[in-house]
Each structure stands twice: as C-alpha cells, then as structure tokens.
C-alpha cells in the first residue's frame, strides 16, 4: 500500500532527495568519458605516410640507406623486414619481380615510398628498374664466352656503384675450403658467427662477402665455384648466425683473382681457397 501526502514539507524533502539522486547519476555519467579518454591516451601512435623519395642510393650502412635526389638533397631511410623491394620489367614496368635487400647497390636509381616514425623515415616500398640491375647481374655470369664482357662489366660496376674506398673496412675474416669444394668446416662456421657478432656490436655495419678459388681448374669452373662458396657463406650468416639480409652488400665471386699467397705451393693454394667476409661502414654514414 502506498501513502501519498500533500504536506508541503514532505514534498520539499522528496524534491531534495530526487535532486540529489539526479546529481549523483549525472556525476556518474560525466565521469565515464573521462575514464575512456585516460585509457586511450596510452595507445601507441601509428606510423603516418611519409614523402615519396626519388634518387640514387649513395650509401648503405647497417639497416639504413642514403638516397641522394637530383637536386643534391640527401635522405637517410631505414630498411626493415617489412620493406618490399621490387624491380619493374616489361612494357611500362607493369610486371614486377620481388627482390632481396642485397639488390640495393650503391648507384642504383630508386623510388622509395616511406612511412614517418618517431625515429625518422622507414621504407615501406622500394622500386627500381630491371635494366639498372643488368650490369650487376653480369658480374655473376661465369660463362667462358662472357669473361671479357664480364671484366668490362666489373669495371663499370665499380665505377658506377662506388669504390670500396667509400667504406671504412673494420675487419676481414677469411674462411677456407677444400679443393673444388664449397662445404663449410666446423671452424669456418664458428668464425662466421663470431664475425657476425662482432659486426652486430658496431654501429651501422654491413657485411661484404667475396668468394675466391686457387688456380686449379678453368675460368668457368672457378667462377662458378667462387660464387657458390660466397653463397654458402651468405646463407650460413643469415640462417645460422642471424645476420639480417638488408645489412649485407651483394655477394660476388672473383674466381682466382686477388690471391693472398702464391698458387705455386700447396700451402699458398690452401690460403687462396677462401671466402672473405668484410665488415664495412660507409664513410658517408660512419658514426650516424
């Protein structure tokens, strides 16, 4: 049973209680959005689209590359595992090949789509032309008929892509092989991971891997063998030692060129059957 009173005092008390209840509900309603704002204040900021940069790769160092535009403007751009690298081919460049980060050679013209992060620019997409990789690919052709052309291509590549003196060579590790083989010994594996660990401790370090042979065998065989040895070392550095592929310059084979000892002795040949792993830091980015 309900009792309703018309007494003014009673009605006034009810009005006060109703007002207090309404104020409490209003206060709770106003406090809720404040909690939501506080919760979202700590969400990490997303990367925003950065500028599209066109130019020439003028330096590589660690997980960064420097791109110089036609007007001389230089941009330092980071490369990571999510960066997509492709080369156009065919009419109007509509067809594309996916490439590894080792294709990013000094001197290559590129178009880079970037993202802006708190630490600077990060490359989301790097595009280049297949024709610009032609000279670089010629250096890996070990056919007998192409050796004179390959020699000229090597000279052109060194001239265009940048001489080794653009880098500070921090150290060189040589791993050796048996005659005609490309099998890594246990000692070689230990030395490679030790070299990778040393390079990891250096700011902006890159690895340059070059394969060699002794004078045994003909030119074609030695070229293929030197490339195979270099490739085996690169694979081990990346797969077993954890070295990132975008922190490695394009490996190459130099057959019996640049011997470190005489090929007239057994001992000298043993020293020449090697892969040299060079730790480099670009002079343009050294100390970056």
Image (cartoon, helix red, strand yellow):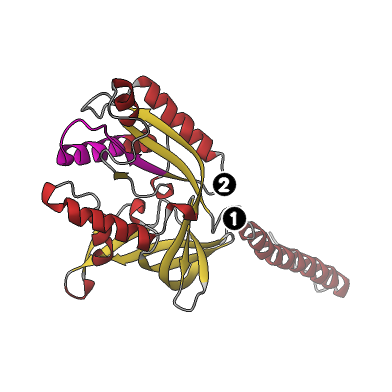
Q: Residues within 10 Å of mark 1 (few under 14, many from 20)?
A: few
Image location of residue 50, percent across then percent down: 49, 70
Comparing 283 with 8, the one in front is 283
Image location of residue 200, percent across then percent down: 52, 39
Comparing 51 with 186, the one in front is 186
Q: How many marks?
A: 2
Q: Residue at x 36, y 64 (%)?
A: 108
Sequence-first disc among 1 and 2 = 2
Quadrant (top left, top right, bottom left, bottom right) of the N terminus: bottom right
Image location of residue 109, percent across then percent down: 36, 68
Q: Which mark is residue 203?
A: 2
Residue 161 part of the magenta-drawn span: no
Q: From which residue to which does the magenta span run?
A: 208-232
Whether label 1 touches label 2, CB < 8 Å? yes
Q: Along the horizontal axis of the image, is 99 left or right of 194?
A: left
Comparing 219 with 13, the one in front is 219
Quadrant (top left, top right, bottom left, bottom right) of the C terminus: bottom right
Q: Residue furthest front?
A: 264
- In this picture, is 287 found above or below 234? below
SS for tag 1?
loop
Q: Quadrant of residue 16?
A: bottom right
Q: Residue at x 47, y 33 (%)?
A: 195
Q: Quadrant of residue 267?
A: top left
Residue 222 part of the magenta-drawn span: yes
Q: Residue under label 1, please give it.
A: 288
SS for tag 2?
loop
Q: Residues within 10 Å of mark 2 (few under 14, many from 20)?
A: some
């Amino acid at each position: 049973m309900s009792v309703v009173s018309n007494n003014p005092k009673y009605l006034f008390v009810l009005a006060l209680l109703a007002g207090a209840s309404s104020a409490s509900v209003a206060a709770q309603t106003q406090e809720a959005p404040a909690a939501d704002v506080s919760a979202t204040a700590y969400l990490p900021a997303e990367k925003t689209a950065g500028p599209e940069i066109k130019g020439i790769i003028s330096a590589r160092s660690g997980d960064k590359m420097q791109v110089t535009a036609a007007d001389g403007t230089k941009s330092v751009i980071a490369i990571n595992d999510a960066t997509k690298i492709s080369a156009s081919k065919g009419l109007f460049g509509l067809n594309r090949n996916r490439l590894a980060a080792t294709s990013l050679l000094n001197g290559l013209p590129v178009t880079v789509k970037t993202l802006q992060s708190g630490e600077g620019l990060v490359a989301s997409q790097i595009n280049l032309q297949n024709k610009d990789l032609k000279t670089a690919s010629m250096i890996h052709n070990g056919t007998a008929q192409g050796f004179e052309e390959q020699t000229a291509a090597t000279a052109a590549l060194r001239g265009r892509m940048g001489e080794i003196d653009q880098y500070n060579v921090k150290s060189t590790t040589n791993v050796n092989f048996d005659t005609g083989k490309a099998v890594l010994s246990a000692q070689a594996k230990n030395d490679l991971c030790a070299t990778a660990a040393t390079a990891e401790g250096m700011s902006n370090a890159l690895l340059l891997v070059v394969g060699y042979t002794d004078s045994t065998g003909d030119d074609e065989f030695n070229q293929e063998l030197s490339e195979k040895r270099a490739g085996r070392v690169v694979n081990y550095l990346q797969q077993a030692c954890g070295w990132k592929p975008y922190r490695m310059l394009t490996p190459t084979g130099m057959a019996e060129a640049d011997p470190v000892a005489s090929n007239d002795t057994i001992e000298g040949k043993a020293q020449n059957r090697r892969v040299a792993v060079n730790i480099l830091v670009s002079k343009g980015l050294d100390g970056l």
